[in-house]
Image (spheres, grey):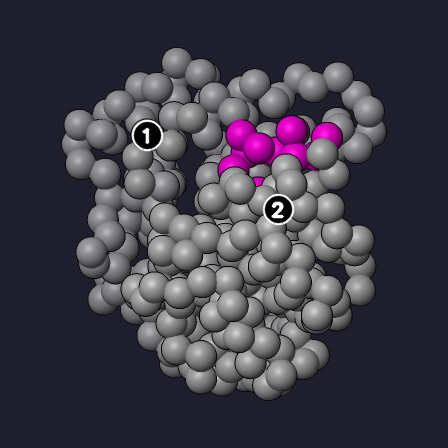
């Protein structure tokens, strides 16, 4: 199993006016991100509102994504608290030849490393041909992976537990496992992470910074001077002042109304925050490539 390397956008989901998942536009958006520089995308992650999108819509997205020319570049989040729903979803995805998944531990309940290992062990036992990226984001699920927990899972299931997305940032500079992908969740950690041996990033703001992030990644790999890291990090800093999902959708919807719809309780930025977002980005002379959707 080759490592998962590069710039991955945690892609947004596009909804129609009835707040149903617009599958064609969501896939087109993902494809555009790859065209603009991302090595791949994670669909149905937290940025993609996975916890709010229905099971049937997720399965239909999987089905249609299997027809994409970039299907090998897609990773799917699961977005379920339920162990059985997670396994059912992964099994369905496998039937369409998708085997790479980003999985966050269940939210709401209090538990520790032993329980997290039990949760992921049951997933691997039921879907042994899967490749799982652990999603470390205590802010969203209430649990934070320890170095020991990740190491134990990777050693126990070296062919299935293949990486971690670290959005709590307590792992990326401490783990060193052979053939294991470490992907921080922010552009702010990209260059430092690469220097430490990380594989790349999976980031929400790569929906708009993907081209910059790819330049930083390529320049590092090619041992060139870094001319884009500062601007990329400054842009990320601006978005970090807001809810990332709301901020990214607000930014994209300024050029294309397809991005305006969000599932409650999520919503676009209010007028004041929107003005601040665009004022701060204008100071950086930042404009993202226009993302066309069908």
Res 29 visible: no
- Magenta span contains residue 149: no
Dividing the picture into quarters, in which one does residue 107 lie? bottom left
Q: Is residue 140 left or right of residue 69?
A: left
Q: Residues within 10 Å of mark 2 (few under 14, many from 20)?
A: many
Predominant SS along the magenta part: helix
* Residue at 42 percent of width and 26 percent of height: 237
From where the camera sits, is residue 10 visible? yes
Q: Which residue has dot 2 on it?
A: 183
- In the image, the segment drawn in magenta is 183-195
Where is 6 relative to 76, above or below?
A: above
Q: Going 79% across and 55% down the picture, which residue do you hit?
A: 179
Label 2 SS: strand
Q: Which residue was labeled with disc 1?
A: 241
Query: Viewer-proximal residue, 78 or 288?
Result: 78
Q: Name, please, the residue furthest toward the top.
A: 283
Q: Secondary structure at mark 1?
A: loop
Quarter containing the C terminus: bottom left
Q: Residue 197's image quarter?
A: top right
Q: Nearer the viewer, mark 2 or mark 1?
A: 2
14 vs 63, left or right, is left
Relative to 15, say whether 281 is above or below: above
Q: Residue 283 at what x, y percent from top left?
A: 39, 14
- Picture quarter with the N terminus: bottom right
């Amino acid at each position: 199993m080759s490592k998962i390397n590069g710039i991955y956008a945690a892609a947004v989901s596009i909804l129609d006016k009835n707040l149903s998942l617009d599958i064609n536009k969501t896939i087109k958006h993902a494809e555009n991100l790859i065209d603009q520089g991302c090595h791949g995308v994670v669909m149905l992650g937290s940025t993609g509102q996975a916890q709010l999108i229905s099971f049937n819509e997720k399965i239909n997205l999987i089905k249609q994504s299997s027809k994409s020319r970039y299907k090998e570049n897609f990773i799917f989040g699961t977005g379920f608290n339920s162990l059985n729903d997670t396994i059912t979803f992964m099994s369905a995805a496998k039937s369409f030849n998708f085997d790479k998944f980003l999985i966050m531990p269940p939210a709401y309940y209090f538990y520790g490393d032993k329980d997290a290992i039990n949760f992921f062990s049951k997933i691997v036992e039921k879907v042994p041909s899967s490749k799982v990226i652990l999603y470390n984001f205590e802010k969203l699920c209430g649990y934070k992976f320890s170095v020991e927990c990740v190491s134990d899972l990777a050693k126990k299931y070296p062919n299935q537990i293949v990486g971690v997305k670290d959005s709590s940032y307590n792992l990326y500079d401490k783990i060193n496992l052979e053939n294991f992908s470490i992907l921080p969740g922010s552009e702010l950690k990209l260059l430092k992470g690469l220097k430490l041996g990380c594989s790349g990033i999976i980031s929400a703001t790569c929906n708009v910074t993907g081209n910059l992030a790819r330049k930083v990644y390529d320049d590092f790999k090619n041992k060139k001077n870094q001319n884009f890291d500062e601007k990329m990090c400054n842009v990320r800093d601006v978005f970090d002042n807001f809810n990332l999902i709301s901020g990214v959708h607000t930014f994209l919807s300024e050029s294309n109304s397809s991005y305006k719809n969000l599932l409650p309780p999520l919503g676009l930025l209010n007028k004041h925050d929107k003005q601040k977002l665009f004022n701060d980005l204008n100071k950086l002379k930042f404009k993202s490539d226009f993302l066309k959707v069908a």
